[in-house]
Amino acid sequence: MIARLMPKREAAGFTLIELLIYVSLMVVVVTLVGAILITALTGQKDITASSSGSTGGQLVTQNINNNVRSATAIHVTPISSTRELLQVSTPGRGATASPTCVALYFTTDDGGAVFTMSSSTTIATPTGSNPSGWTKLAEGLVKSSRPGAPSTMLTANATMTTSVSYEFAISNGSGKPQLFASTVTSRQNITASGSASCA
Amino acid sequence: MRLVRRSKQLRSLRLRGERGSTMIAVIGITVVTAVVAVGITGVTMGALATTGNSRSAIQAQAAADSGIAAAVAKLNTEACAPRYSRSSTPAYSVEVFWSATATAGFTSGCPTGTDTSYLKLVSTGSSLTAASGGLGAHRYVEAIYQYSPTVIEPEAPVGVSPSGAALYSYSTSSFGMTGLTLVQAGSARPTVILRSGDFVCNSSSVINGDVIAANGKMRIDNCVINGNAASSSSFELAGSGKINGDVNASGVTSGYSVLMTSPSSSITGTVWAAGPGKIHIPIGGDYVAAGASNGKSIFQSSSHVSGAIRVSGDIQAAWVTACGGYSDSNAIAKCALQQSPKHVDGTIDYKVSGLTAPVVPIAPDWVDYNYSPDDWPGYDVITLTSSQCDWSWAASPGLAKLLQAANSTTPTIIDGRACNSIAMWYTANPALKSDLVIIAKSFNVGSNNFTGYNNEPRKMWMITPDTVADGKPTCSTGDMQINGDFKVSGSLSAMAYSPCTISLSSTTWRGQMYAGYVKMNSNQTVNYDPLGLPGVDLDTGDPSGSGSGGSGAPSTDGTGVVSLPAISYRDVSSAG
């Protein structure tokens, strides 16, 4: 009596139809989950890269600002179409002014980077995409693709430079490069004699 | 029935187990998503922190810069303060240092002197919001400027500081003192100065003070000088002239530096001459004849030197040809001068080397004084019209103006430059209740006695302006004629200034006179009490001297001017 009452189908497992439906649903679910995961991971990578680029770019701009603001002499040297050099003479930040030469080297070669160096003497023009003795501030330097952007990343306003305009981008990841552009003017009374140092 | 219910329970359990596979997928997705979310959140927070630091640093930097700008603005408009601060955005605190040099030696606070100095402003800027970790909350900017404190010259006292001689005459071919009695009425010793020309006193004048001929000879004939006499050239004493003081003669005329041949004249002090002299009078002090000249000083029989004789040349005793068996003329003269009756009480030295001639007396240059109301702060001004120039009858409108000024208790200026001349012959005898200044192109006054009201000390100036600032009197108008018993007396002192001639006759004057030429005709008495002129120093001839200014060093009120641009402007790592 009890055996007769037990359903035979339950004891026999899933039917083929059930399995097909189950597998189909699983494929759909896995596909959706995979897509979500890939998108999330890609987004994380992009965000990380973008953040890194932003941080690097800000580091570069801060470096330019801090040095040019107090500069007693400013020189911009376009080394080549992919390499530019900014040299400034600053009195330092100590209690007593101590003239110091600071240089920033912009190169878009080999993925692009910005380097810096300071010295009490004139800094020689660097060569290559990874110059020895220089400190890397940021990677992924590319030229600005903004329509109307200057052909050079650094622009000096005159022979006796009192300010520097810069426009460059940092590209880290697949996203759109982050653009950094501004003009920094020294607050020092730059004279012709002062412009001769650190050049 | 129980079996049927049991069967339904088993089927229900089996179906729930089948749905568990979906749960695993959901859990997996959740875990992965959580990992990704945590990663993105971390990156995002890091980026936000960096951006926040940048923002905070920029805010602090801008605040520090604004502090410098604000401090400079304050320094240019207000008294220097050792610290400027602002607590609201942009928040800054600027500390002021100063030094005499631009590079070192800065001390906290504001400059105290009046010399140009340098200010170092160290501004601490604070960000509006502190970034994470507090980074960028403060930035420091140092700026060095040249600073010129406002220099305040000593305040000129109310009125005018006294300066100048009793009688100053700039130039004349022959300055004659005739019938002059000069006495000291105040605390200053009277001096008569002839800036250029020969000085002659050829009448019975009595000078209770010093006389100076700064660029000419001096001849004192029947005059009494109760003071010193100095001449840039030779000196001659004649008649019964007396010098109760020293005589300096810095030049030589016709072979003699001093010529004193009248036995009735005398000198009580020392005679110091640039060359030889001829002496026939008593000299109370030494006789020194210096200079490179080898001339011979001749002593005559009435000579007597109470002191010593020292000459760079030779000596001669005119009344002897031999003495003591000496053959040398200097020895013979020395012998004769020292034998009884002695003509010299002290030692006698001749051919003395190294004697120096007396210095040429210095007289101050002419001071051009042009009238400006600004020189007379606190004075009311009455401006005369051309119909108010004659004060010679009782109802004259000009006299009414004078009496109005005389009765005013406020110092008053009567500006009579519209008149060719101010004439005053009506005897009004004004008693001044306050100080009075009369400006006119020329004067012709007499028959009046100006005094101070109620015997209170008052001052009066009669001025003919010298409108050409060329350091010499420029007479383009007319003389100042003070005669006909014109008096300034009592408690009133007066200053007469004219680039032309001041002509005196029967005048009694308390005060001083300063003119291109002071001409004395007869019977004038000057009681010297210096008044001076505003803005000039008649003692030194400095037209911008301290004659009207106060004494003491210049000071500053704490304000000044910051010179732009900055000598140095830089970011620093700390406010220290």
Image (tube, coloured by chain):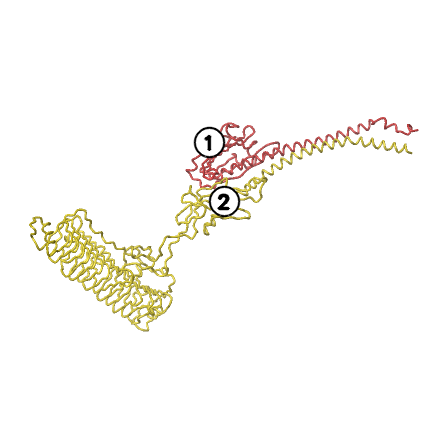
Chain colours: A red, B yellow
The chain that hosts pointer 2 is: B
Compared to B450, does A81 lie above or below? above
Could you say which quadrant of the image residue B205 lies in? bottom left
A24 or B508: nearer the viewer: B508
Could you say which quadrant of the image residue B164 lies in? bottom left
Q: Which residue corresponds to mark 2?
A: B123
Q: Quadrant of the N terminus of chain A?
A: top right
- Residue B520 lies, in percent from the top left, at 22, 64
In the picture, measured across the screen, residue B422 lies left or right of residue B7, that is: left
Compared to B529, does A93 lie above or below? above
Q: Residue at x 66, y 31 (%)?
A: A41
B384 or B171: nearer the viewer: B171
Please tell me whether mark 1 sits on a helix, a strand or a loop.
loop
Asked whether the viewer can see residue B115, the reply is: yes
Q: Residue at x 51, y 35 (%)?
A: A154
In the picture, measured across the screen, residue B362 lies left or right of residue A132, that is: left
Q: Quadrant of the C terminus of chain A?
A: top left
- Residue B148 lies, in percent from the top left, at 41, 48
Label 1 or label 2, whichever lies nearer to me, is 2
Could you say which quadrant of the image residue B279 lies in? bottom left
Compared to B392, does B312 lie above or below? above
Q: Amino acid at mark 1?
A: Ile
Q: Which residue corresponds to mark 1?
A: A123
